[in-house]
Amino acid sequence: MVEPYKHKYPYDWRTKKPTIFRATAQWFASVEGFREAATDAINQVTWTPSQAENRISTMTSSRSDWCISRQRTWGVPILVFYHAEAKEPLLNEETFDHIKSIISQKGSDAWWYMSIAS
């Protein structure tokens, strides 16, 4: 027997608008490589309000791998290119140097207006 069922719909806590969850591939950064340097930098800042220091210190000390590829309408794009045939990321010095050169010369907006071939 089939009966209608009314589903609860998830809402985004910030915008209060309906949202759809979907599993997508993401990029993660290991915090272990810079946790100590981040903690040292946090300790050198004068925080206003002072409670903010405790909050960021706690987050930094307990953070596991950090998802850096969250799909947001703001932020800086992750500068990763994929091999056209192998579909693998091009993570090498030559690619990074090329990207750094473009950003240095044209600014970060180059990511949006330059062609893939460039």
Image (tube, rainbow, N blue to C red):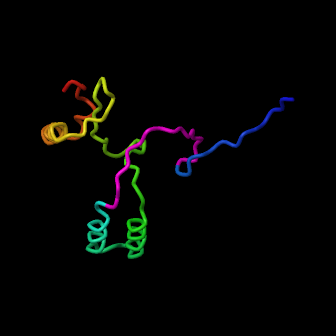
In this view, which residue lies farthest toward the right? 1
Query: In terms of depth relative to the viewer, which is nearer, 58 or 113?
Result: 58
- Left or right: residue 22 compared with residue 79: right
Position of 42 relative to 83 (above/below): below
Q: Quadrant of residue 40?
A: bottom left
- Left or right: residue 53 compared with residue 113: right
Magenta stretch contains residue 17: yes
Tell me which residue sits at (57%, 38%) in the image: 20
Q: Quadrant of residue 34?
A: bottom left
Tell me which residue sits at (32%, 65%) in the image: 35
Which x, y percent locates residue 4?
Answer: 81, 32
Which x, y percent locates residue 110?
Answer: 22, 34
Which quadrant: the C terminus? top left
Position of 80 relative to 15 (above/below): above
Which x, y percent locates residue 33?
Answer: 29, 60
Which x, y percent locates residue 42?
Answer: 30, 70
- Label count reads 0
Tell me which residue sits at (53%, 38%) in the image: 22
The dominant secondary structure in magenta is loop
Which quadrant: the N terminus? top right
- Left or right: residue 56 compared with residue 95: right
Tell me which residue sits at (42%, 75%) in the image: 51
Query: In terms of depth relative to the viewer, which is nearer, 77 or 65?
Result: 65
Q: Which residues are magenta?
A: 15-32
Position of 38 relative to 93 (above/below): below
Query: In terms of depth relative to the viewer, which is nearer, 88 or 28?
Result: 88
Magenta stretch contains residue 35: no
Position of 116 relative to 92 (above/below): above
